[in-house]
């Protein structure tokens, strides 16, 4: 969350026409926002542990080794059996709740701390309330992000396989390097888009609450809509 706060700071500065530099990624340290953002990360870790415990309980002891083997097989081109969870409905529900609240609460709390001047508890409370009040729009936006990530990830995986094969014609190391660079570029773009979406969600939901800092320049402001 500390670096995500820095990335949102860069997005906000660029949106308002102010110059940005790579070191602006560490703006939370300069603005004395690093501690509450780091504590926000602990909340995210706690949510992940709770979700992980539920998944282990719902899937059985053999599910995750089989799932990891399936992922390794997919990466290397081998066809493996898709593992079946003991309680698939609970698995889907736990994953949905984790991804929804970790995004809607944790990521929207970052700009609350960075730009609205709120403390950790107030930011989490307001973000949690907004995640309930805007449930329909948030869920729709989440589904769009997940669908886009799946489609884009599939396209990037195919492209990575192609460039890896072309590079391997020269040397296997070159093939691995080109594929890694492509995945790194995809991860960078995805992170920035996700961060920007959460920034606009915060701006749209809380701009009417009297936060002067929440409103970007009128000529450049685009309302957040799913």
Image (cartoon, helix red, strand yellow):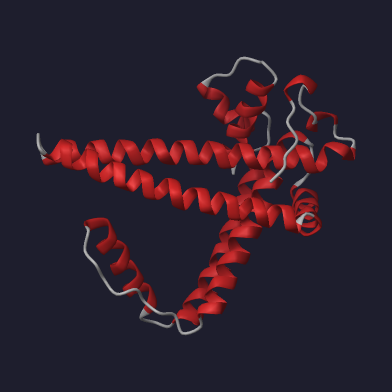
| Residue 225 in the image: above or below residue 32 | below
Q: Residue lying farthest right?
A: 210
| Residue 106 in the image: above or below residue 189 | below
Residue 113 placement: quadrant: top right
Please provide percent x and percent y for residue 117. 79, 37
Q: Residue lying farthest left?
A: 170
Residue 164 placement: quadrant: top left
What is the total number of numbered labels drawn onto the structure image? 0
Quadrant, the N terminus: top right
Please provide percent x and percent y for residue 216. 76, 26
| Residue 153 in the image: above or below residue 76 | above
**Residue under the point 56% across and 59% down:** 45
The residue closer to the viewer here, 50 or 34, is 50
**Residue under the point 67% across and 57% down:** 139
User: Would you say 49 lies left or right of 207 here?
Assistant: left
In this rendering, does residue 30 appear at all? no
Please provide percent x and percent y for residue 161. 24, 45
The residue closer to the viewer here, 101 or 43, is 101
Residue 178 placement: quadrant: top left
The residue closer to the viewer here, 80 or 6, is 80
Please provide percent x and percent y for residue 106. 66, 51
In this rendering, does residue 18 appear at all? yes
User: Would you say 172 lies left or right of 34 here?
Assistant: left
**Residue under the point 29% across and 75% down:** 81
| Residue 21 in the image: above or below residue 134 | above
């Amino acid at each position: 969350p500390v670096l995500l706060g820095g990335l949102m700071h860069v997005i906000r500065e660029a949106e308002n026409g102010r110059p940005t530099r790579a070191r602006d990624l560490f703006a939370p340290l300069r603005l004395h926002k690093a501690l509450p953002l780091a504590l926000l990360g602990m909340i995210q870790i706690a949510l992940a542990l709770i979700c992980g415990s539920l998944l282990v309980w719902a899937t059985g002891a053999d599910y995750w080794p089989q799932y990891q083997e399936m992922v390794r097989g997919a990466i290397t081109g081998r066809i493996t059996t898709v593992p079946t969870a003991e309680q698939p409905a609970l698995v889907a529900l736990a994953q949905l709740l984790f991804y929804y609240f970790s995004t809607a609460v944790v990521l929207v709390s970052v700009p609350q701390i960075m730009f609205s001047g709120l403390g950790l508890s107030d930011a989490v409370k307001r973000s949690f309330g907004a995640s309930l009040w805007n449930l329909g729009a948030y869920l729709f936006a989440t589904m769009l992000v997940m669908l886009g990530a799946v489609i884009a990830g599939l396209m990037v995986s195919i492209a990575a396989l192609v460039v890896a094969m072309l590079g391997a014609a020269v040397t296997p190391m070159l093939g691995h390097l080109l594929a890694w660079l492509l995945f790194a570029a995809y991860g960078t773009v995805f992170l920035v888009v996700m961060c920007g979406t959460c920034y606009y969600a915060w701006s749209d939901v809380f701009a009417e609450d009297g936060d002067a800092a929440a409103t970007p320049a009128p000529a450049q402001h685009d309302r957040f809509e799913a």
